[in-house]
Amino acid sequence: MSSSTDFWAEIRLCLDRIEIEKPNTFEGVKAIVQAHGNPGKIDNPALFFDGGGGDDRMVDALRLAGWKVVQAEAWYFFTAVHPETGAGVEYIEGDMYPHPR
């Protein structure tokens, strides 16, 4: 298996975990993304998801996990809110932030 294949398999595992585990907070999403090779900076609440260029999308994983997209310019620029907790995620070309910031 090539390193490119390994990379995309890890991205798919990350998105699968979001869909299956259904995190309902930004911190829950962040913990899953960080567990799959996207550590981010400890002192920064933001996160970078480096799988944005693939066939599978974070926006779809969040929707399947129960999040509602409340604003979207494109699949790479959206805001999603969890209907039960009110927690929010802002996604801009792979950068992820708690919403509101």
Image: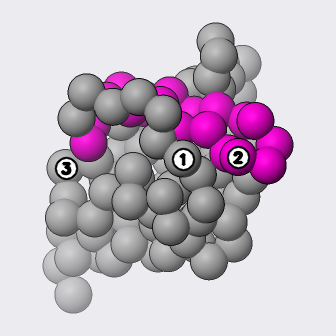
Work out whether mark 2 precedes mark 1 in sequence or the reverse, and give the earlier one: 1
Q: Amino acid type of disc 1?
A: Lys
Label 3 crowd bin: few (<14), some (14–19), many (20+), radius 10 Å: few
Rendering coords of residue 22 (x, y %): 68, 66
Reading the image, the residue beneath label 3 is 53
| Placement of the N terminus among the 4 image quadrants | bottom left
Identify the residue shown where x is 61% and y is 60%: 66
Coloring basis for residues: one colour
Reading the image, the residue beneath label 2 is 83
Reading the image, the residue beneath label 1 is 68
Identify the residue shown where x is 39% and y is 50%: 59
* Alpha carbons under labels 3 and 1: distance apart: 22 Å
Identify the residue shown where x is 71% and y is 58%: 23
Callout 2–callout 1 Cβ contact below 8 Å: yes
Tell me the magenta residue range. 75-92
Which callout, 3 or 1, points to the residue nearer the camera? 1
Label 2 crowd bin: few (<14), some (14–19), many (20+), radius 10 Å: few
Residue at disc 2, secondary structure: loop
Q: Amino acid type of disc 3?
A: Gly
Task: Inspect this view and state whether residue 85 appears.
Answer: yes
Q: Nearer the viewer, residue 64 or 3?
A: 64
